[in-house]
Image (cartoon, helix red, strand yellow):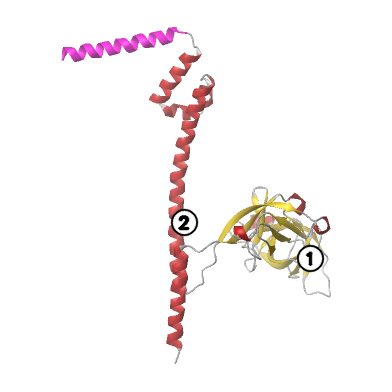
């Protein structure tokens, strides 16, 4: 018992001497490094406060980088845990959706995978008509695959694939005269005023004119359209996913008494001259769950045909 008490006293005296020595020494680089390591090992959460950067200022660069890397590693581990939870929740929702589609007899939508490609070529004679990108059939690009661009941190509709090669593909821009997209128009001001209620939207057909701006036709004559109204891809579009930004209204034409619809001119959300890279939505290979779902749907359809047969 006395031996343990003496050992404890020796340890206490040793720590006291070390502490007094460190307090008496000037704040040189090695001393600051030792103090930072001791503080971080004993209480690492102290470096997560608002004054963390002030604490880092007096630490040598190599030790500061080591502690910063450890903090980033812990933060990334927490994000990985959150991503795993989100992925598990998404898988659960996907399974539930597949079950509900099977119960209602609905056809499952085809999956898509995103593929980024760089713009290789612009023909000056076809500036507003097409571009060539560095992705082709080897990367799974197929005809009529929708092509999107990045504008202000968001995705906007650009065009579709009309010619596929082994390593390249030709994108028909929405501004081309042969291009048309089912779209709808909605006013941001109306959406703000409506609050939680869905704002009124007006369906139409967006068509290219071979120049910088597009034209939206077949709008209802009673539709209230203003400059600045936003245009998105329609859920009825055969090429693009729904609710992707296309542009905004630049000019409202006077209503022609000989036409049963009104037209507006649309400024694209992203001009062709600013395109450097695009996102191609290619068909994703079916997963095992998707294959099982298609097989089950086909079996159910065959069973229904046999029951209906006389």
Q: Give the CA distance from mark 2 to mark 1.
A: 41 Å
- For disc 2, the neighbor class at 10 Å (few under 14, some 14 to 19, many from 20) is few
Secondary structure type for disc 1 = loop
Q: Is residue 30 above or below residue 165?
A: above
Identify the residue at image location x=51%, y=72%: 107
Looking at the image, is 84 positioned above or below residue 24? below
Q: Is residue 78 left or right of residue 177?
A: left
Name the residue carrying label 2.
90
Residue drawn at x 43%, y 86% as measured from the top left? 306
Q: x, y percentage for residue 258?
A: 84, 75
From the viewer's perspective, tell me whether residue 270 is left or right of residue 306.
right
Q: Position of residue 202 (x, y in %)?
A: 69, 66
Q: Residue at x 75, y 49 (%)?
A: 274
Q: Nearer the viewer, residue 97 or 310?
A: 310
Q: Is residue 193 magenta?
A: no
Q: Which residue is mark 1?
A: 177
Q: Secondary structure at mark 2?
A: helix
Residue 15 lies in the magenta-colored region: yes
Q: Residues in magenta?
A: 1-25
Query: Which sits in the foreground, 127 or 243?
Result: 127
189 to the left or right of 4: right
- What secondary structure characterizes most of the magenta part? helix
């Amino acid at each position: 018992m006395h031996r343990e008490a003496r050992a404890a006293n020796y340890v206490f005296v040793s720590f006291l001497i070390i502490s007094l020595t460190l307090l008496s020494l000037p704040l040189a680089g090695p001393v600051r490094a030792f103090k930072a390591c001791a503080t971080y090992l004993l209480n690492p959460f102290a470096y997560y406060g608002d004054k963390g950067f002030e604490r880092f200022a007096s630490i040598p660069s190599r030790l500061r980088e080591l502690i910063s890397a450890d903090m980033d590693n812990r933060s990334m581990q927490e994000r990985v845990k959150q991503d795993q939870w989100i992925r598990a929740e998404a898988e659960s929702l996907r399974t539930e959706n597949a079950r509900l589609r099977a119960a209602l007899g609905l056809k499952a939508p085809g999956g898509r995978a995103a593929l980024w490609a760089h713009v290789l070529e612009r023909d000056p004679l076809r500036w507003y008509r097409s571009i060539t990108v560095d992705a082709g059939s080897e990367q799974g690009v197929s005809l009529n695959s929708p092509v999107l661009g990045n504008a202000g941190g968001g995705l906007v509709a650009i065009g579709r694939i009309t010619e596929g090669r082994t390593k390249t593909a030709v994108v028909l821009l929405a501004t081309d005269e042969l291009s048309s997209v089912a779209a709808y128009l909605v006013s941001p001001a109306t959406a703000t005023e409506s609050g939680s209620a869905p704002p009124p939207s007006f369906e139409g057909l967006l068509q290219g004119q071979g120049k910088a701006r597009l034209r939206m036709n077949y709008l209802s004559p009673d539709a209230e359209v203003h400059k600045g109204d936003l245009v998105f891809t329609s859920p009825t579009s055969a090429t693009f996913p729904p609710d992707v930004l296309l542009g905004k209204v630049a000019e409202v034409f006077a209503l022609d008494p000989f036409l049963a619809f009104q037209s507006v001119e649309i400024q694209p959300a992203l001009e062709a001259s600013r395109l450097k890279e695009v996102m191609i939505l290619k068909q994703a290979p079916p997963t095992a769950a998707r294959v099982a779902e298609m097989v089950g749907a086909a079996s159910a359809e065959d069973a229904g045909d046999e029951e209906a047969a006389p």
